[in-house]
Image (tube, rainbow, N blue to C red):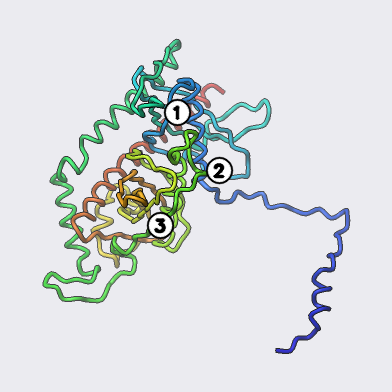
Amino acid sequence: MRVSAPWIDALKGQNKPAAEEPSDTYTQHDMKARKMSDSTIFMDLDAMSGIIAYKHTGEGVVIVTAAVDRITIENPLTELCDLEYSGQVTYATGRSSMEVTCKVTRAGYPGEEAKQQDTLLTCCFSMVALDPKTRRSTPVPALDLQTVEEQATFKLGESRSLARKAEGAQSLLSHHPNEAESALIHRLWLQHRDAQGFQLHGAQTENSADSIVPMAATRLQNALICQPQYRNRHQWQIFGGFLLKQTFELAFCCAANFSHARPTFVSADPCTFLNPVPVGSVLYLTARIVFTESVSSDDQEDESHARSASESFSGITRLQVRVDSRVRNVEHGTSKPTGRFHYTFTVPRKLVVMPSTYQEFMYYIDARRRAHRVQNSMDITNVDKMANTKENSATE
């Protein structure tokens, strides 16, 4: 193919420096807030929790992340700004575990007082101390409560610990779905079997709604080798923040692939790290959409799943992504679960996920319970914000 200019002339023109702009020209920079990487914040929070835990216990133990409490975005950022991380040990009874509460806020100007709306998120990490030789749990110092505020914070940590134990006792692994949940499963199957493409007698029909997607079709997988640059300070396993980062990014991609829109992160459910991830092992991650609900009809979220797809819809859809992680030893071929992670997003589209197998229905029921707990916590947070706003107004 002939070109308009010889290659040597084109190369000279490409390497020729561009003319400099006049010195009096001022370039306007767009300071509008962009979508930030929440996964990086999660990794930083886990690293900071480890530093705070070592400050409490000293250097004679090994600190590992055992669990993460719910992470909810309280006040999304609306402008480019610096972030300030802070945290402290808020619950420690003298046993092997401790709770570290972390906060991420917008860094204000020097001398500026912190405001409630500057708080981006608040979360808690459960850290466990291990003996460096035996790798077994070892006691940590208990907190010395001296003020009323410290006692109140300690009580909150105790209530969270009891809530986690209560939720574990009501797990679907130990108890079958209750009567209302069983009725919901049957109603969903009756309402959506035609839209899913199957009749009662097995005859296949056309899908009447593009917004109804089988849960199996939302599955997204990833596999990666755990590199040594992501190990913790003890050089024998990957630190928990890396798992949070990888699972969140896969959940985000799964939600985007499912909705064909950019998801907005809402919250991360409490999760527990079941087994360590050694350096050099292969980490397998599987994400799937397990629950959807219409935000515009909070009082009838169950009916929003069971209604016909031809009905009108307005608002956005809240969806929950479940990420299962397993680690495989390359040499021995054995695999172990490392944890289950649940992330909630919102998308500006009408979407309904439809389970088909019994296992998928259990995923759906478990995610539905989690969604109700998230909504309850958000309602309590909104009530506290309104109370603080009224108190500030009365003070002024």
Which of pointers 2 and 1 indicates the residue nearer the eye?
Answer: 1
Bin the neighbour count of mark 1 within 10 Å (Cα to Cα): few under 14, some 14-19, many 20 and up: many
CB atoms of marks 3 and 1 within 8 Å: no
10 Å neighbourhood of mark 2: few (<14), some, or many (≥20)? some
Residue extending farthest front:
331
Quickly name the residue at label 1. Answer: 101
Residue 381 drawn at (x, y percent): 41, 34
Extreme-top residue of the structure: 146
Q: Work out how far the residue at label 3 is from the one at label 1, CA to CA, in angstroms.
A: 31 Å
Q: Residues within 10 Å of mark 3 (few under 14, many from 20)?
A: few
The answer to whether residue 173 is above or below residue 110 is: below
Q: Circle 3 sits on which residue? A: 222
Q: Give how far across and how far down residue 315 sits, in percent.
A: 40, 56
Q: CA distance from mark 2 to mark 3?
A: 30 Å
Q: Identify the image quadrant of residue 271.
A: top left
Residue at 80% over, 77% down: 10
Q: Residue at x 25, y 46 (%)?
A: 366
How many labels, in total? Answer: 3
Residue pushed farthest bottom? 2
Of the residues tagged 3 and 1, which is closer to the observer? 3
Type of the residue with mark 2: Leu
As rendered, which of 211 and 171 lies closer to the eye?
171
Query: Is the N terminus in the top left, top right, bottom left or bottom right quadrant?
Result: bottom right
Left or right: residue 343 compared with residue 51: left
Is 1 positioned to the left or the right of 293 in the image? right
Label 2 close to label 3 by CB (< 8 Å): no
Instruction: Give the residue at mark 2.
Output: 77
Q: Is residue 24 visible?
A: yes
Which residue: 39% across, 16% down?
142
